[in-house]
Amino acid sequence: MRGRTLAAAAPQLVGPARALSTNLGAALAEARLGRRRAAAHPGFDAELAGVEAGYAAAADNHAALDAAGWPVAGYKVGATSSAAQARMGMTRPFWGRLYAPATVRFDSAPASGARPAAEPPHATSRSHPEPQPPHAGAAWHPTRSAVASRAEAQRFSISESGIRGVEAEFAFVLRRDVAPRAGGRSYDADELLEEYVDCVMPSVEVCGTRAPADAKASAGLLVADGAGNERVLLGWDAAVAPAKSVAAQLASQPAEVLIDGAVVASGLGREVLGSPETSLAWFVNEVVQGGPRVTLRAHQFVITGAICGLVPVTKACYVRLSFPQWRGGGWVADLAFRP
């Protein structure tokens, strides 16, 4: 597996791209905090079409969320398949930050095959309550995340949360900091799994948007808008440690998405840059060794990309994301969506 690292320099967020994004990233953060869409502004189309401008606006977005007391819990990698990159007009993956108030940890026995014990999609009650953020500046730790039972569906409002769809992914949790190193020496997947990663687990990303309804979709806007994240559900009770013990199997691990009981998408781990651990190595070299020079902290996690692609959710429904062969007994997450 050594030598499979896809290292590349991150875009330099300086110059015109940095100036153009002023206030747009913050506006998206304010909309997220208020659980609403941002107000219409021509800049969302004119200034955020390019990925570099998107990363610049993402820095403003992060600054606003950080000031509001949203600590970074982890990171995501997106556009990890050629199909996703072609659809988004990109030639490489992108990355974004994930936050503690938008992270939920599953700690329970595996759910049965029955429909989740949750309100029906047409119910009028509000979506699953957002976990409250810790005090400003507090470091992320999994024991402080919201804990949910997989015996009950996580509930979402499509309109309130700007839901776009769901993704089945693998999450790698760090056991120690990963810091920039002198000389530009890159990290490879084997080294990360052996020395830095504590465990790997199935996860679900619910994707959403805070962009104005009339904004033109673009790669830059997606990057600026929290990389399209609404919430992450971590399969903590299904974690495998050490991660290296299952790394060779990740490429062949299947996942599938069911809507109202019917399979609508399926895939294997190899859809993620050939294997999820390769995506992890790409991310570390992009963000830690590349332009941003970010230090990843112990207990933070990285979700490495969609195994089945982004599965759209546009109407009230029940959604099940399943990893049928994980640890021999499988793992599922049940979600309920209402308009």
Image (cartoon, helix red, strand yellow):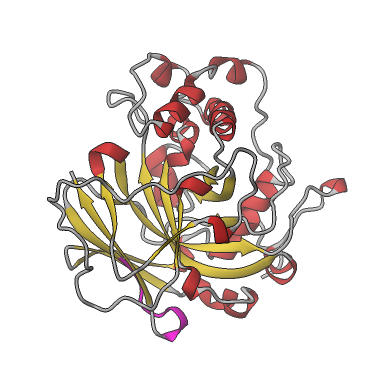
Residue at image coords 15%, 57%: 120
Magenta range: 321-328
Residue at image coords 59%, 34%: 66
Where does the N terminus fall, quadrant-wise? bottom right
Occupied quadrant, residue 324 = bottom left
Residue at image coords 55%, 16%: 22
Horizontal relation, residue 56 to residue 270: left or right = right
Label tally: 0
Residue at image coords 59%, 43%: 71
Foreground pick, 164 / 104: 104
Q: Please, which residue is most extreme toward the right here?
A: 183
Foreground pick, 128 / 287: 128
Residue 42 locus on image (x, y percent): 38, 13
Residue 215 locus on image (x, y percent): 33, 24
Where does the C terminus fall, quadrant-wise? top left
Q: Please, which residue is most extreme toward the bottom here?
A: 328
Horizontal relation, residue 130 to residue 337: left or right = right
Residue 246 locus on image (x, y percent): 57, 78
Membership of 327 in magenta stretch: yes
Foreground pick, 274 / 33: 33
Q: Please, which residue is most extreme toward the front here?
A: 135
Foreground pick, 78 / 163: 163
Q: Is residue 288 above or below residue 245?
A: above
Membership of 253 in magenta stretch: no
Q: Is residue 93 visible?
A: no
Residue 270 locus on image (x, y percent): 48, 66
Q: Can residue 264 be seen in this view?
A: yes
Q: In this view, does 267 lie above or below 240?
A: above
Horizontal relation, residue 57 to residue 149: left or right = right
